[in-house]
Image (spheres, rainbow, N blue to C red):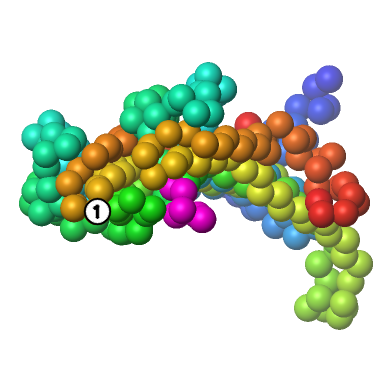
Amino acid sequence: MVSPFKIFSFFIYPFIVGSLITGCVSYRVIKAVEGRSVSNIFAEFRVGTTTLQEALEALGAPDQVAELEGKDVLIYQQSLLSNSGLSFGIPLTDIWGPGFDFSAYGELVRYDLVLLSFTPDGILSDIASEKGSRYPYLKTILSDKKGN
Amino acid sequence: MKRFREPLFVLLLVFFLQSCAGWAKNKDYHPFDASGLDKLIPGKSSAAQVTEILGAPSEIVKLSNGNAYIYRRSLSKGTGLWLLIVSFGNYDKHYDQIVIFFDTKNIMTHYGVTLDAHKAAHGLPF
């Protein structure tokens, strides 16, 4: 017969080891997506001919609507948040005081955007778009370029 | 090989004993019914008829040649998974949106519909 103390040790040791390890090293990955992906169908739109009705039928309801210098602007967007963090340290705060600790965290929010500008008559006058999601996470967050 | 069996078992137990998972769901609810749009006719229906069918809009925007009523609600789902030293989180948010355009006489001219809230899903961040 197996001793109950041996069975007990199978559970309590992993718990203690786990508790110690989790205090030392941790790595996290978080992703948050808001909104739908913006369809590429707007590439077929033509300034001066595409109407507001056609744009609404192709892309659906815009995420934002605004008036800008006498024109109506429709904005379609999707945001993509990526967050990751690495922490390494020795949690001796309670018995030793401040201990060795190293941590690095990063958060990047990228946007896919399409901006359509219409005249008061509902004719497309301008298109602007940006596909932020094509930029890779690590390369973008570590970039030191001005404005980035 | 046999001598690694016990440490491996302990390591697996560590993973299970120190792991947990969580799910969350949030709703920003507005009770408009998009099927009511079938009763609205561009060029004829008034703002009063729109609000009678869809209720009060979430937002009103002044435009160059009238205004727009925006109806919006959202559904978001979150998932969390903690495995000893690694944790994963995922958050997915989608919207149901109706934007109705009116001219200066408050007559509906166009509308756009996106019903995507049901696409919010639980999952992992990769």
Q: Main secondary structure of the magenta part?
A: strand
Q: Residue at x 47, y 34 (%)?
A: A124
- Tell me where residue A112 appears, x and y as whole percent: 60, 38
Q: Quadrant of residue B90?
A: top right
Q: Is residue B89 magenta?
A: no
Badge 1 marks a residue whose secondary structure is: loop
Q: Residue at x 45, y 40 (%)?
A: A118
Let me know if residue A110 appears in the view.
yes
Of residues A129 and B34, which is closer to you in this image? A129
Let me know if residue B90 appears in the view.
no
Of residues A136 and A3, which is closer to you in this image? A136
- Disc 1: CA contacts within 10 A as few (<14), some (14-19) or many (>=20): few
Of residues A110 and A87, which is closer to you in this image? A110
Q: Is residue A94 left or right of B30 when viewed as pictured? A: right
Q: Residue at x 83, y 59 (%)?
A: A103
- Tell me where residue A68 appears, x and y as whole percent: 50, 54
Of residues B11 and B87, which is closer to you in this image? B87
Q: Is residue A69 magenta?
A: yes
Q: Is residue A125 left or right of A110 when viewed as pictured? A: left
Q: How many tags in the picture?
A: 1
As drawn, B82 above or below B2: below
**Which stretch did the figure color magenta?**
A67-72
Q: Is residue A29 left or right of A38 when viewed as pictured? A: right
Q: Quadrant of residue B13?
A: top right
Name the subunit of mark 1: B
Q: Residue at x 62, y 43 (%)?
A: A111
Q: Amino acid at mark 1?
A: Thr
- Tell me where residue B107 appears, x and y as whole percent: 17, 46
Disc 1: which residue: B104
Quadrant position of the N terminus of chain A in the picture: top right
As drawn, A23 above or below B22: below
